[in-house]
Amino acid sequence: MHYVSRWITPEGAPRRFDTRFFVCAAPDAQTPLHDAEETIAHEWVRPADVLQRHRDGAVDLMTPTQSSLKWLDEFDTVDDVLAAAASNGPGGNYQRG
C-alpha cells in the first residue's frame, strides 16, 4: 500500500475534513464490500469512465476524488500506478491541501 495524497478542507468551511488517499493492488478474486453506512454503493469502474460520467452530470465527484481519478487515468496498469506512487514517496508531487 502506498500513500498518494492528503486533502484538507480550507479553513472557514462549515465542516472540515482531513483525508488521505492510498493505492494498493486488490488480491485476485477479491470481492468488494462496503460498510452500508458512510458508503452506500460500490462498483469497479475505470477512472476515465467515471470522469466521463461526471462531465455528463450523471455522478457528482468532490475535487479530491476528481484529481485522484485523473492521476490514476494517466497509467495503463495497476503495476504502473504502484510504481509511480512508490517512486514519489509520501505525497510525492501529488499532495494537495
Image: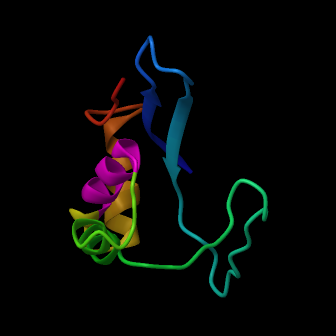
Residue at left 32%, top 53%?
66
Closest to the observer, 70 or 92:
70
Could you tell whether 39 is left or right of 91 in the image?
right
Vertical position of residue 9 compared to residue 76: above or below? above
> Is residue 86 visible to the viewer in this orientation of the structure?
no
Which residue: 37% across, 47% down?
Answer: 85
> Is 4 drawn above or below residue 74 in the view shown?
above
Does the rendering let one see residue 55?
yes
Task: Give, as a single range, the part of the protein colored magenta.
Answer: 62-72
* Quarter of the image that includes the C terminus: top left
Instruction: Report x, y in % for residue 14.
Output: 53, 21
Quadrant housing residue 12: top left
x and y, in percent, of residue 22 in the image: 51, 47
Q: Quadrant of residue 82?
A: bottom left
> Position of 45 compared to 51: left or right?
right
Q: Residue at 53% across / 36% down in the picture?
A: 20
Q: Quadrant of residue 74?
A: bottom left
Q: Main secondary structure of the magenta part?
A: helix
Q: Is residue 57 above or below residue 67?
A: below
Tell me if residue 67 is in the magenta stretch. yes
Is 64 on the left-hand or right-hand side of 2? left
Q: Is residue 14 above or below residue 28?
A: above
- Asked whether, in this view, residue 95 is left or right of residue 26, the answer is left
Residue at (30, 78) in percent of width and height: 49
Q: How many marks?
A: 0
Residue 3 magenta: no
1 or 37: nearer the viewer: 37
- Residue 60 drawn at (x, y percent): 39, 60
